[in-house]
Amino acid sequence: MSKRDYYEILGVSKGVDAKELKKAYRKLAMKYHPDRNPDDKEAEAKFKEATEAYEILGDAQKRAAYDQYGHAGVDPNAAGGFGGGGAGGFSDIFGDVFGDIFGGGGGGSRGGPQRGSDLRYTLELSLEEAVRGVEKKIRIPTLVSCEVCDGSGAKPGTKPKTCTTCNGMGQVRMQQGFFSVQQTCPTCRGQGTIVEDPCNSCHGRGVKEETKTLSVKIPAGVDTGDRIRLAGEGEAGSMGGPAGDLYVQVSVREHSLFHRDGRNLYCDVPISIVDAALGGELEVPTLDGRVKLKIPAETQSGKLFRLRGKGVTPVRGGAPGDLLCRVQVETPVNLTEDQKELLRKFQESLTGEKHSPQKKSWFDGVKKFFEEI
């Protein structure tokens, strides 16, 4: 490991950003690369030194350790050090810096069977369906393996032939200046094989577009954002590769009465001022039917009443949640003159503050607020 300051090696300041850091390393790498300086030991040493410096400073964690502890923070032989040569090594660093120029560093994947893409389908459910579980049929547009050629793309009775340009590797090595890089084979486009006599059904693609119908079992208790994986129901793979997966994303519609929050349900219940003042008994809805809710006398608007076990049982198990009923005291409308007169007399009969428990504290708060202005 070089003991020179890494920032000095690359010719940058300590506060340099990632873009300028890469630019500085690229300049030095181009200048001192061994292919440009054959049999020049000094240039080779400077190239290795610059690469070591960029490996440390180009990694956020290693750079932070180096800034705080110096070379001891990244020395593989020091306790807690990150080390100068990770699993990626020089090829990863060099490809990261020069890949945008030469179309990729080394070694793409060998041509052959490729796994199909995963698909996502958003399934909209009612609250009742999500809470109780349901089985739904969905129609999915997708790519499926061609049955005529069994996904090979070749006409029945024939087979794809090995690409003579890349010898089946899917990659070709090209010389660009003093660099030797690998690129996707332009003849087979990375497949490694060529279909000379294409299948008439899929026209050599190996897959066809179809719409398939699937039956999806939705477990009880799912909520918006939950996903159900259907293995092998995604797009077909190419060249006979395995199919991808289908992910069914759950979206629960808003309900006219209930609002869900995790395992609990919330419901607003309107009550009259008479029931709020004198108490009474109401029928309230739950997902399992109607239940009786006792309203005690002198109930204030916004009070929550809990009905235990009337919520949702979570999809991953556990005790069911509760239903919380929030009462809303309703002001009467469309009153007759006689009714208005009765209310006026009722208001006149209310003396003192004992009938309005929140009124005094509210006005006290208002008074304090204005006094502090």
Image (cartoon, grey):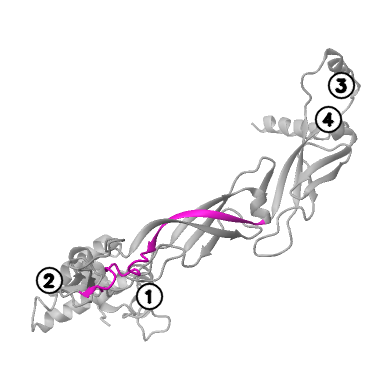
Location of mark 2 (residue)? 31
Amino acid type for the residue under numbered disc 1: Tyr
Query: Tags 3 and 1 in contact by the CB under 8 Å rule?
Result: no
**Crowding near the residue tagged with mark 3, few <14, some 14–19, many ≥20 C-alpha atoms within 10 Å:** few
Please name the residue shown 83% across and 16% down the image.
340
How many angstroms separate mark 3 from mark 1 (CA)?
A: 78 Å
**Relative height, residue 285 to residue 208 (above, below):** above
**Relative height, residue 358 to residue 4 (above, below):** above
Q: Quadrant of residue 344?
A: top right
Of the numbered discs 4 and 2, the one sitting upstream in the chain is 2
How many angstroms separate mark 4 from mark 2 (CA)?
A: 87 Å
Name the residue at the front extreme.
Answer: 157
- Classify mark 2: helix, strand or loop: helix
Which quadrant of the rendered structure holds the C terminus? top right
How many angstroms separate mark 1 from mark 4 (CA)?
A: 72 Å
**Crowding near the residue tagged with mark 4, few <14, some 14–19, many ≥20 C-alpha atoms within 10 Å:** some
In depth, the one of 191 and 337 nearer the eye is 191
Of the numbered discs 3 and 1, the one sitting upstream in the chain is 1
Q: Can residue 134 be seen here?
A: yes
User: Percent position (x, y) of residue 266?
Assistant: 71, 46
Which quadrant of the rendered structure holds the N terminus? bottom left
- Classify mark 3: helix, strand or loop: helix
Check residue 69 in the rendering and tell me which mark sits there, or answer none.
1
How many angstroms separate mark 2 from mark 3 (CA)?
A: 94 Å
